[in-house]
Amino acid sequence: MPRMVAETPYIRADVKAFLDALAAMGGPKIADMTLEQARAGYVALHGMADAPPRELAVIRDLACPGPGGEIPLRLYDARETRDPGPVIMFYHGGGFVIGDLATHHSLCTEIAFQMDLPVVAVDYRRAPEHPFPAAIEDCEAASRWVAASPAALGRSATGLIPMGDSAGGNATIVVAQLLAAQPAAVPVVLQVPIFPLASDARGSRSMDDFAEGFILTKGAVEFFDAAYAPDRADPRGFPILGDHSLAPPTVLVTASLDPIRDSGRDYGAALSAAGIEHVFLEIKGGTHSFTNLRQAVPGYQQDLERVFAAMKLMLGAQR
């Protein structure tokens, strides 16, 4: 029987230039770092590679009550005041371990500017200090608070749009499932999971094909998994296990060079099987974290704008 030869993946020129530059810089693997070094490295990567933040009329820190104490939030809005409308709930990536409001500040300004909608970013509790399901509990609590607290927010939400990248993409799907099972004060009108971990990525083809050299590594996924320690039988850990029949309209985004790409594809298949209206975008020749590398890889700005166009299409279909 002839031996199967792995195909050479397509890598865009601007992406390859950035990956080559990172490889030349070297540095320790995340599994060999302390927690503080891993978090500082993530901040440094985004500081070097991400586009500058947009200037907005409103960037304001808030807080809401949560199951483990006060949850820090940050409100972004291109307008000082606005009529009632949807509010985007943003849950940052970083494996539930290394991200925070600072690592995704530029991205949140871009979302608020491009979508002309308020964005509320959630600074949920992180592992390993607070393992599963602390982050999910905070994301759910913050979303319910925003839905019911127009006076505190200064804006009235008519619907919620959970949105997030990577671990935040996982939280996006999970929060939408929790709010479908037990509705908040306003409905979820759209969800936007970006390169999410929806199913267990261990043993997937994409995890093997892109284990090293493509921003997120197999070792990093294992590092995050050990710190977060999700229950593999709980849909709050792996939302592919949840009920997809009540999922909201969805914009689902994956990247073709991402080790957890197949996890996102699994979720798209589940949405299709359940008959849920969704737009599926796969960034060809692109990597995990493309949303936060837009200065280093100029083409990623256009990829992100495709996501916004799909969001506007799906929201427009509801009017």
Image (spheres, grey):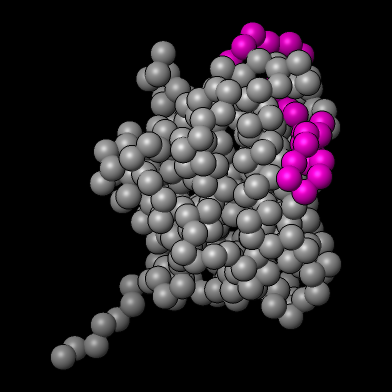
Q: Locate residue 256, reporting x and y percent.
A: 43, 58
Is residue 121 shown in magenta?
A: no
Q: Locate residue 288, reporting x and y percent.
A: 55, 57
- 281 left or right of 296 in image: left
Q: Nearer the viewer, residue 242 or 122?
A: 242
Q: Is residue 222 visible?
A: yes
- 123 left or right of 238 in image: right
Quadrant hosting residue 132: bottom right
- Quadrant (top left, top right, bottom left, bottom right) of the N terminus: bottom left
Q: What segment is highlighted magenta in the picture? A: 62-85
Q: Locate residue 281, reporting x and y percent.
A: 40, 44
Q: Locate residue 157, reporting x and y percent.
A: 62, 19
Who's the residue at 38% across and 36% down the image?
A: 246
Is residue 69 shown in magenta?
A: yes
Q: Nearer the viewer, residue 285 or 180?
A: 180
Quadrant hosting residue 278: top left
Who's the residue at 79% across and 58% down the image?
A: 44
**In the rendered image, the vertical position of residue 234 relative to residue 225, given as above or below:** above
**In the rendered image, the vertical position of residue 55 relative to residue 27, given as above or below:** above
Who's the residue at 24% across and 88% down the image?
A: 3
**In the rendered image, the vertical position of residue 178 relative to residue 57, given as above or below:** below
Who's the residue at 29% across and 81% down the image?
A: 5
